[in-house]
Image (tube, grey):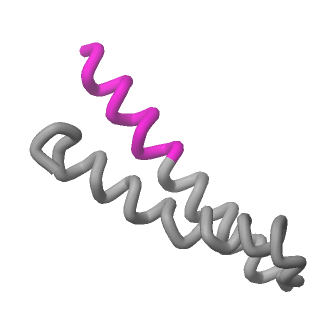
Amino acid sequence: MKRIGAESGAMISMAGPVITILLSALFLGEHLSCIQWTGCLVVLMVITFMEYRKLIIGKT
């Protein structure tokens, strides 16, 4: 946590469950419903938005 910071650590912890779901679908053949895919997409979009916002705010 000291190296990457609390905010980056939180982003990584948000992505962990999504990555687990995607890998289980890929390697274990799990079938996901539309709402589960939508939830994964929303989480990834939020992470992307927060990282993008951090880059924009950091430049000004």
Residue occupying image coordinates x 74% and y 74%? 24
Of the pair 3 and 58, the residue shown nearer to us: 3
Where residue 14 sits: x, y (%)?
43, 64
Above or below for 14 versus 5: below
Quadrant hosting residue 44: bottom right
Is 27 one of the magenta-colored residues? no
Where residue 35 sits: x, y (%)?
77, 82
Image position of 22 (left or right of 47): right
Residue occupying image coordinates x 25% and y 15%? 60
Q: Residue furthest top?
A: 59
Where residue 26 sits: x, y (%)?
83, 65
Residue occupying image coordinates x 17% and y 44%? 5
Total numbered badges shown on the rendered structure: 0
Where residue 2 sits: x, y (%)?
10, 44
Image position of 32 (left or right of 20): right
Above or below for 50 versus 11: above
Identify the main secondary structure in magenta. Answer: helix
The residue segment tinted magenta is 48-60
Is 57 one of the magenta-colored residues? yes
